[in-house]
Amino acid sequence: MIKYDRLWVTMKEKGVSQYDLYTRYDIGRSQLDRLRKNKNVETNTIDRLCSILHCNVEDVMEYVSDPEQEE
């Protein structure tokens, strides 16, 4: 399972709010909702977030194994 918990930490460290993302950088509110809920997000969105935040992919997302899928 891909989780985006690191995104919120990185945003706080960089001083970028969700409001900034959808007003200054045109990241849609629906995309932010998908990120909050750890749903599928297109790679171009991840690319844009990394560009905006000047960070690496691992600063935005991480893989966490899902015990339910391992069975």
Image: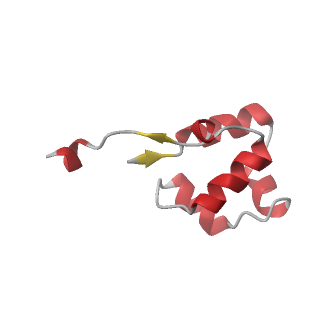
Residue at 71%, 46% in the rendered image: 50
Residue at 86%, 59% in the rendered image: 24
Determine whether, in the image, residue 18 is placed left or right of residue 70. Answer: right
Determine whether, in the image, residue 44 is placed left or right of residue 16. Answer: left
Where residue 9 appears, as percent x and y from the top left, is: 64, 34
Colour pattern? secondary structure
Where residue 36 appears, as percent x and y from the top left, is: 54, 53
In this orientation, which residue lies closer to the viewer: 19 or 35? Answer: 35
Q: How many marks?
A: 0
**Residue 35 lies in what quarter of the image?**
bottom right
Where residue 7 appears, as percent x and y from the top left, is: 62, 42
Asked whether residue 8 is in view, the answer is: yes
Asked whether residue 32 is in view, the answer is: no
**Residue 53 lies in what quarter of the image?**
top right
Farthest residue, direction top: 13
Where residue 44 appears, as percent x and y from the top left, is: 65, 61
Determine whether, in the image, residue 16 is placed left or right of residue 3. Answer: right
Residue at 78%, 35% in the rendered image: 14
**Residue 8 lies in what quarter of the image?**
top right
Farthest residue, direction left: 71
